[in-house]
Amino acid sequence: MNRSLLTIIAVVVVVLGFIVKGSVFTVHQAQQALVVQFGEPRRVITEPGLNFKIPLIQDVIYFDKRILSLDAQPEEVLTTDQRRLVVDSFVRYRITDPLLFYQTVRNEFGLRGRLAPSVANALRGAFGKLDAVTIISGDRPSAMHQVFLSLQDNAERLGVEVVDVRVKRVDFPDAISQAIFRRMQTERQREANEQRATGFELAEKIRAEAERQRTILLAEARRKAEILRGEGDAERTKIFAEAASKDPEFYAFYRSLQAYSNALQQNDTTMILSPDSEFFRYFENAPGTTPNTAPRAGGQK
C-alpha cells in the first residue's frame, strides 16, 4: 500500500512538473512573443520577464526586437539615358507589430517574399529618374529617400518598420561590363602604343642629335689636326730650309744618306744603276776607294 501511494505521488509530481514547465515561459530583452491558441493569436508580450500560458493548448512564437537585415536580389534598372544598371541593395528593418507581422507574413521568410518585390519596384521607380553617371557616382540621396519612403509605407502594412535602405553595389550587366572592359583595354593599348611611338620618335631624335654632334666634333677635330699637321710640316720644312741654308753640302749629304737608307733595305729587291749615276756620288770618294773607283752597276744587296 505504501509503495502504491509513493508511485501515485511520484506520477502526480511528474505530471505537475510537466504542467508547470509547459505553462511557464520567459521572454528575453531582445525578444517579443505572441501567444497563440490552436493557431489563433491570443495576446502579445513585448516586455521581458516570466509569463504563463495554458499548457498543451497554447503555444508561444518568438520574434526578434533587434534591427534585422534583408538582402534584396540584385535588380536591373533602366536609367534616363537608356543605360541598364544592376543595383544590389539591402534593407534594415525592425518588427514593431508582432500580431500584424504574424497575420500577414508569419515569419521572416514570408516577409522576404512580400518585401523583396517592393524593394525592386521602389528601386526601379527612383533610379529610373536618374542617369547612369549620377547613380554610379553615388550622388543619389534624394532617390534613396524616395525608396525609403516607398518601402516604409509598404512595410507598415506588414507590421515592420524600415530603418534604412542602402545600396551595396551598382554595376553594369555582365555583357555590358565585358564590352566596357574590352573598350577600356583597347583604349589603354592605344595609349600605350602612342606613348611607345612617342618614346621611339624621341629616342631617334636624341640619337640623331648625338650622331650630328659626334660628326661635328670629329670634323672639328680633323680640321684642327690637319691645321696642326700643316703647321708642323711647315715648321719642319722651315727648320730643314734653315739648316740647309747654313751648310748646303752637309744637307745634300744627309739627304743622300736618307735615300740610301730607304732604298737599300734588307729585302730581295734588285737594283740596276749606271756606275756614274748621281745616286753614287758620295761613294766615289769614300774611304778605301780611289777617285776612279765606283761600285759596279748591277750590284745586289
Image (tube, rainbow, N blue to C red):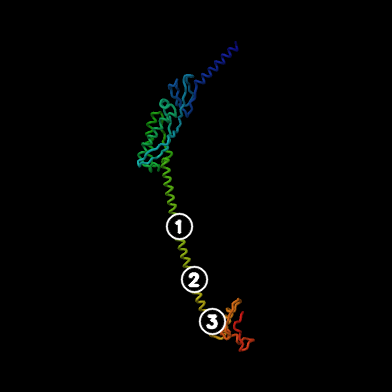
Direction top: furthest residue: 1
Q: What residue sits 63% from the left and 88% below the top? A: 290
Circle 1: element type: helix
Write the residue at 44% across / 50% down: 189
Mark with earlier residue (1, 3): 1
Q: Distance between the residues labelled 2 and 3?
A: 26 Å
Q: Is mark 2 on a helix, strand or loop?
A: helix
For the C terminus, the quadrant is: bottom right
Say which of 134 and 31 sits in front: 134
Residue 236 drawn at (x, y percent): 53, 79
Tell me the number on the disc at residue 200. Answer: 1
- Against 183, residue 77 (above or below) is above
Q: Which amino acid, mark 3?
A: Phe
Mark 2 and mark 3 in contact? Answer it, CB < 8 Å.
no
Give how far apart the Cα atoms at labels 1 and 3 are. Answer: 58 Å
Q: Which of marks 2 and 1 is nearer the N terminus?
A: 1
Identify the residue position indicated by label 2 in the image: 222
The residue under label 2 is which amino acid type? Arg
Q: Which of marks 2 and 3 is nearer the N terminus?
A: 2
Q: In this view, does 201 lie above or below 71?
A: below
Q: In which quarter of the image is the N terminus?
A: top right
Q: Which amino acid does label 1 sit on?
A: Phe
Q: Name the residue under label 3.
A: 240
Q: Residues within 10 Å of mark 2 (few under 14, many from 20)?
A: few
- Horizontal and vertical percent for residue 96? 42, 29
Disc 3 crowd rating (10 Å Cα; few below 14, some 14-19, many 20+) is few
Q: Are marks 1 and 3 in contact (CB under 8 Å)?
A: no
Vertical side of 72 occupied by 202: above or below: below
Q: Residue 86 vs residue 245: left or right?
A: left
